[in-house]
Amino acid sequence: LVSKPSAATSSAPISSSAPPKSAEQVWRVRLSPDDAAMGPKDATVTVVVFTAFGCAECTEFKGELDRLMAQEPYKSKVRVVFKHKVLPTPHPDAMLASQAALAAKAQGRFWPFHDKLFANSFSIDRMSLLGYAKELGLKTKTFEKDLDSQRFRTQVLRDSLLAYEVGAHSFPN
């Protein structure tokens, strides 16, 4: 999904009157200041990635995206925005892992935590998440309080609903 950020961004397809001429379609996706993003704020292209922690396909996609974003012209012209997409099955710990990633973001460590989760995609249970927080030097009491309070649950659910609204039904999208 690709969008150019603007105040008038909506979740409707750019052209809904006729089917796309190819398998590719461009959507305008609502962005939030709460979203984790990397790349220049004034990028020519913004790629919005809906993905889930604990998803093997998403882990593979992350590797490809990392390789692409390490190269020019992509790293200077493309912005990647991360959106959470969780389903209770087949990724039962994805909701907790997404909330943990946002708790890490609140401490300025989203991307290292994100990378740790994808590197350990089959170990995203609560005890593992607490261990990663400690490894990355997060304030573990604050991190655990954020998890217990489910402070970021609404943001995760909002992202997941947005994925549904724009037709991002598979993993990753």
Image (tube, rainbow, N blue to C red):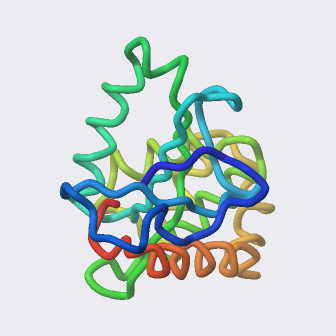
Tally the marks.
Answer: 0
Q: Residue at x 38, y 15 (%)?
A: 71
The extreme front residue here reads: 17
In this rendering, position of residue 46 left or right of residue 35: left
In this rendering, position of residue 40 left or right of residue 53: right
Q: Is residue 22 above or below residue 38?
A: below
Residue 63 in percent (x, y) is at: 28, 37
Asked whether 106 or 26 is in front, the reply is: 26
Asked whether 109 or 83 is in front, the reply is: 83
The extreme top residue here reads: 72
Q: Residue at x 32, y 76 (%)?
A: 169
Q: Is residue 170 above or below residue 165?
A: above
In this rendering, position of residue 34 left or right of residue 57: right
Residue 53 in percent (x, y) is at: 39, 62
Residue 118 in percent (x, y) is at: 37, 50
Q: Residue at x 57, y 72 (%)?
A: 159
The extreme bottom residue here reads: 88
Quarter containing the N terminus:
bottom left
Residue 91 in percent (x, y) is at: 32, 77
Q: Residue at x 80, y 61 (%)?
A: 142
Q: Is residue 39 above or below residue 55?
A: above
Q: Quadrant of residue 24?
A: bottom left
